[in-house]
Image: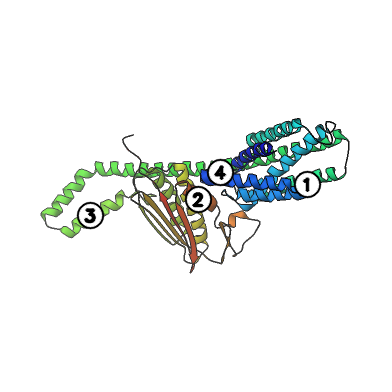
């Protein structure tokens, strides 16, 4: 019996690793937690309790085991219910298939072989087709209500058992049907989540292309002005030499300043040398300058950092969108941005003014000013979850605070500079 519990624990292990990211969990702690879980399950199996009580106890133990991993509590409860529910359905199916194979009221070893086979097949199908995208953090509303599907399946099984039906075909059909229903519904929901993730990624890529197009336009205008200056350079130098001969220093300064102003490219607000940052920030600042009153931006970063353009778009795109939208609705219309790199650390600080009260729910901030709960576009922190995920990817941290009408996001990430020789 202990060997069978170990085999089931292996299936549970595969289920959990399909649901959650296990990179941050230490192996020693992981092994110890599974060991104590195995002991607890073996002890509950020995208790003279009814099947529903044992099932509830095993589900609670599994839920406590899953606390080892990072994720929302709703997702953890869904995982525990699904795993226990699918295993119970497999057990019921095996019992009805071997209903006439009892010897002295007991099942032989073939029962455990068939039961493990059913559990393993269901886990592999779930892992391969039904929970590929659920592992990713999404903002799909009410997806965690899927927990009711395994719960209803479990209730159906217990009602079937309580009815004492001796029709093995009916019992097998109901059990197999519930298994298929769970697999089909989770497959459909997982595909929907996958489609939602692709839509978000497409939006990011679209904004990235738009920022590159804007930057290309800025560069072309800059080159056009440089060509014009080069064409008239002989005349400019003649005028400057004439002024120098006559000692007209102030006029030389004014003349050079006018040349600098003429060289400034329209739409180029920052020029750090980092193409990914410049293209995205110039696009966002173009919108900010048009819609806000006070916009200040300071960028001091190396030309090449070990951050992909895709990740830059998630971080700066989401934060700048939220900041501009909130500042536009405020009286001050204020936006301050600062990006600074020093000794392997990237600092990002974004401040914006806002109007109305801010209500925090989990990792989102909601505005109570003309807030429509059916309109997710009014969520101030829309995308904050994805930003936090990227920040954690670079072993960083993010702080959010709001007081005195100023909303501020502070980010610290550990990023290395690309080796230009490679």
Where residue 135 appears, x then y in whole percent? 59, 43
Q: Is residue 218 left or right of residue 143?
A: left
Check if mark 3's residue and mark 2's residue have beta carbons within 8 Å: no
Label 1 element class: helix
**Badge 2 is on which residue?**
387
> In the depicted view, which residue is nearer to us: 149 or 246?
149
Mark 3 Cα-neighbour bin, 10 Å: few <14, some 14–19, many ≥20: some
Alpha carbon separation for disc pair 3 and 4? 74 Å
Residue 51 visible in image: yes
Query: Which of disc 2 and disc 3 is earlier in sequence?
Result: 3
Query: Which of disc 4 and disc 1 is earlier in sequence?
Result: 4
**Badge 4 is on which residue?**
31
Q: Residue at x 50, y 50 (%)?
A: 387
Check if mark 1's residue and mark 4's residue have beta carbons within 8 Å: no
Mark 4 Cα-neighbour bin, 10 Å: few <14, some 14–19, many ≥20: few
**Badge 3 is on which residue?**
255
> In the depicted view, which residue is nearer to us: 351 or 58?
58
Query: Which of disc 3 and disc 1 is earlier in sequence?
Result: 1
Mark sitting on residue 59? none
Residue 133 visible in image: no
């Amino acid at each position: 019996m202990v060997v069978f519990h170990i085999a089931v624990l292996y299936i549970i292990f595969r289920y959990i690793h399909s649901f959650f990211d296990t990179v941050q969990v230490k192996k020693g702690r992981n092994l110890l937690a599974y060991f104590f879980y195995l002991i607890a399950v073996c002890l509950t199996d020995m208790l003279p309790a009814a099947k529903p009580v044992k099932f509830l106890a095993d589900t609670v133990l599994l839920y406590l085991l899953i606390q080892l991993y990072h994720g929302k509590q709703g997702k953890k409860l869904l995982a525990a219910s699904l795993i226990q529910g699918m295993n119970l359905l497999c057990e019921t199916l095996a019992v009805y298939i071997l209903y006439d194979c009892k010897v002295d009221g007991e099942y032989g070893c073939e029962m455990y072989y068939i039961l493990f086979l059913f559990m393993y097949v269901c886990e592999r199908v779930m892992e391969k087709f039904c929970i590929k995208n659920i592992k990713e953090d999404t903002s799909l509303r009410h997806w965690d209500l899927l927990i009711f599907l395994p719960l209803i399946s479990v209730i159906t099984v217990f009602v079937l058992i309580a009815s004492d039906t001796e029709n093995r075909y009916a019992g097998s059909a109901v059990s197999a049907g519930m298994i298929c229903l769970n697999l089909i519904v989770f497959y459909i929901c997982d595909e929907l989540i996958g489609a939602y993730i692709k839509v978000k990624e497409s939006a990011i890529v679209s904004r990235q292309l738009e920022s590159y197009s804007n930057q290309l336009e800025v560069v072309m205008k800059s080159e056009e002005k440089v060509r014009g200056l080069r064409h008239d350079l002989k005349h400019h130098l003649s005028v400057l030499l004439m002024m120098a001969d006559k000692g007209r220093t102030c006029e030389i300064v004014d003349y050079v300043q006018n040349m600098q102003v003429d060289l400034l490219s329209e739409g180029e607000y920052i020029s750090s040398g980092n193409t990914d940052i410049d293209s995205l920030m110039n696009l966002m600042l173009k919108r900010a300058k048009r819609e806000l009153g006070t916009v200040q931006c300071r960028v001091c970063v190396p030309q090449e950092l070990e951050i992909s353009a895709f990740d830059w778009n998630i971080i700066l795109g989401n934060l700048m969108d939220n900041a501009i939208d909130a500042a536009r609705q405020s009286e001050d219309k204020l936006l301050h941005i600062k990006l600074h790199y020093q000794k392997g650390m990237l600092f990002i600080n974004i401040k914006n003014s806002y109007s109305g009260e801010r209500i925090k729910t989990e990792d989102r901030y909601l505005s109570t000013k003309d807030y429509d709960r059916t309109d997710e576009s009014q969520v101030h922190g829309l995308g904050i979850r994805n930003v936090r995920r990227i920040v954690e990817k670079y072993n960083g941290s993010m702080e959010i605070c709001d007081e005195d009408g100023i909303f501020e996001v502070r980010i610290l990430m550990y990023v290395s500079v690309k080796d230009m020789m490679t």
